[in-house]
Amino acid sequence: MKLKAVLLGTAMAVTGLTMAAPADAQDVIRWASASDALTLDPHSQNEGPTSQMLIQMYDYLIERDIGLAKRPALATSWVAIDEDTWELELRQGVTFHNGAPFMANDAVFSLNRAMTEPSDFRNYLSSVTSVEAVDDYTIHIHTDGPNPILPDWLTGIFIMDEEWAIENGVETAQDFAEGEENFAVRNANGTGPFRLESRQPDVQTVLVRNETYWGADAFPNEVDTIIYTPVASAATRVAALLSGEVDFISDPPTQDLGRLDADPGIDVVDVNQIRTIFFGMNVAADDLENDTVDGANPFQDIRVREALYRAINIDAIQQVVMRGLSVPAGMITSPGVNGYATDLDERLPFDQDGARALLAEAGYPDGFGITLHCPNDRYVNDEAICTAAAGMLGQIGIDVNLISQPRSIHFAELQQGIQDFYMLGWGVPTYDSEYVFNFLYHTPDGNRGSWNFTGFSNPDVDANIVAMGSEVDLAARDAIIRATWEMVIPEYAYIPLHHQIISWAMRDGFVIPIRANDQVLFKYATFE
């Protein structure tokens, strides 16, 4: 039976949503979640909900299937032809949504754009020295020495139409942190399974089937139209799903999962996500802007960092805030990522007395005040986690001023360097620890460490990160990764909290396979 788009006037009156489908649309999925994509510029923001929207319209050279295994996309093959060159053969007969043919120059342009400031994807290609078109459907990617995992990094770079970008003045990525607008922010021209029909940021986005999609015969491709509406209120999202006004919510609130699952017309699915939630601390500044300590930075003292870590009762957060839908973490990567180890994933024990003693030893027997910045619409129960943690820190004398705000503001402030104590969550699209180290632990230098807002810096760690990017002996490489984790974990620049468990909820009538990276691929959706 085909799922039809139905307008439920009563439900709309209750929720205030307008999710009407085009008059000629048949197979429609009305999708809602808490927050919209920050931008449609494909190289501006390396951020989950943004990539979630873009992957419907843009393709990678190499993509990941439902089980997260690599598979050909715009590249049909990839092979290292010497120690510092990868050759990719490109798919022929592919067109962009505007009808322009996809060719090697587009791939070269896109990779160079992603490598250039202010792109938020520079770290993906930090080892790349140049990209060249060998012919219309072959490119060579040259690296600074061997890079055995370059194909994994290419699963995160969207491919644009060079001519379209030049015509519309978007040869470089949007500078999101500075609030820049460009044509690509609200418009899209990819090769993906859906094309952009209309876009009202933070109101509604409509995507329609790309009838010339190269993968039309390789995937189900049963969806005609996707109507996406961001709905900040969890209660409103749930009410819309229960009433039938919405077909699918990709972030149902944990407190309502039982009620949704009990509804005979709704299916709830969950999976351990490859994402870890944690707090970061500015360990580099000589003085903090957001604390009550004059002329000093308490986070520079490892005893203070350890004290804050020990003061957080993660079991209580798991049971009360997360309702069991989280796994306490001792390292900021999760099972499924190369380099993860259960013995390294052990947290410091919750110990309020020990935390107070550490603060006293560090010269803060009465504690101090600090501002904690958190998003309120990005991670599962993010604001509630921060509220609980703030109360726990108060028990050891840390007076927390909690600022909880939309992720668009939170991430822009992070990138502007104005937060000293903050929440962040980190997925690993390459499924390799180098990604974590490259973004979060390497000394910030423009090409690496672009999300290392702690200022953590260790030359030995930096050397290891570079080495693991070129070591072709996998056993030796794994040893470098483990040694690096053993170096950074006890520095406590980050306080790991937990690995997320994610849930999706959808009405009967179709199936969307859930993925451990929390990324919906509507081209795999099938109607019953």
Image (cartoon, grey):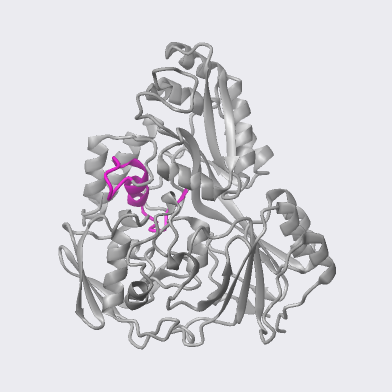
Q: Is residue 184 magenta?
A: no
Q: Residue at x 58, y 51 (%)?
A: 501
Q: Residue at x 81, y 72 (%)?
A: 8
Based on the displayed image, in which of its 4 quarters is residue 125 positioned?
A: bottom left
- Which quarter of the rendering shows the C terminus? bottom right
Task: Give the camera-side residue of 86 and 14.
Answer: 14
Is residue 245 visible from the viewing direction of this image? yes
Q: Residue at x 28, y 48 (%)?
A: 446
Q: Is residue 94 left or right of residue 421?
A: left
Q: Is residue 369 left or right of residue 237?
A: left
Q: How many marks?
A: 0
Q: Is residue 441 magenta?
A: yes
* Vertical arrangement, residue 84 with respect to residue 479, above or below: below
Task: Give the camera-side residue of 51 and 462.
Answer: 51
Instruction: Please provide percent x and percent y for residue 370.
Output: 52, 26
- Which quarter of the rendering shows the N terminus? bottom right
Q: Is residue 50 left or right of residue 321?
A: left
Instruction: Please provide percent x and percent y for residue 230.
Output: 64, 60
Task: Give the camera-side residue of 269 and 341.
Answer: 269
Instruction: Please provide percent x and percent y for residue 447.
Output: 27, 50
Based on the displayed image, in which of its 4 quarters is residue 524 positioned?
A: bottom right
Is residue 313 visible from the viewing direction of this image? no
Q: Residue furthest right?
A: 10
Residue stretch in magenta = 426-449
Instruction: Please provide percent x and percent y for residue 268.
Output: 69, 61
